[in-house]
């Protein structure tokens, strides 16, 4: 698995799945974790790819510990 890239005050990663159903199921799992953490990703999905970008809006759109914790939780869901 690729690791998160930090650039321009964002953590980024692209996840690739077998098909749209797997990608959407992953997004559902991420949504449940993000809601519990009250920290929500910026993301896009096209067929089997999910691109996620994390930063903390309330901290001035920079990468914070909240982003690193959510990234670690997302990695557990793959």
Image (spheres, helix red, strand yellow):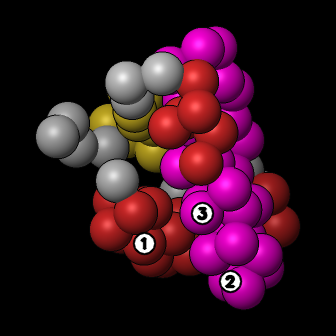
According to the picture, the residue beneath numbered tag 2 turns out to be 37
State whether residue 77 appears in this view. Answer: yes
> Extreme right residue here?
58
Q: Is residue 73 above or below residue 20?
A: below
Q: Secondary structure at mark 3?
A: helix
According to the picture, the residue beneath numbered tag 1 turns out to be 73
For the residues bearing labels 1 and 2, Cβ distance under 8 angstroms: yes
Label 3 CA crowd tier, 10 Å (few <14, some 14–19, many 20+)? few
In percent of width and height, residue 53 lies at: 58, 39
In percent of width and height, residue 23 lies at: 54, 35
Between residues 11 and 30, which one lies in front from this camera angle? 30
- Is 46 magenta? The answer is yes
The span picked out in magenta is 26-52
Q: In 3D space, how far apart are the residues under numbered discs 3 and 2 (Cα atoms)?
A: 13 Å
> Extreme bottom residue here?
36
Q: Which sits earlier in the primary sequence, circle 1 or circle 2?
A: 2
- For residue 12, the mark is none
User: Which quadrant of the view contains residue 51?
Assistant: top right
State whether residue 56 appears in this view. Answer: no
Q: How many marks?
A: 3
Q: Secondary structure at mark 2?
A: helix
| Residue 22 in the figure: left or right of residue 45 | left
Which residue lies at the image location 42% right of the left edge and 72% below the top edge? 73
Q: Secondary structure at mark 1?
A: helix
In percent of width and height, residue 22 lies at: 50, 37
Q: Is residue 65 above or below residue 4?
A: below
Which residue lies at the image location 58% right of the left edge and 24% below the top edge? 20
Label 2 CA crowd tier, 10 Å (few <14, some 14–19, many 20+)? few
Between residues 31 and 67, which one lies in front from this camera angle? 31
């Amino acid at each position: 698995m690729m690791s998160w890239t930090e650039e321009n005050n964002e953590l980024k990663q692209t996840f690739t799945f077998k098909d749209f159903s797997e990608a959407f199921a992953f997004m559902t799992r991420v949504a449940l974790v993000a809601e519990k953490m009250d920290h929500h990703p910026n993301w896009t999905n096209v067929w089997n790819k999910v691109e996620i970008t994390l930063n903390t809006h309330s901290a001035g759109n920079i990468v914070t510990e909240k982003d690193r914790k959510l990234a670690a939780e997302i990695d557990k869901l793959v």
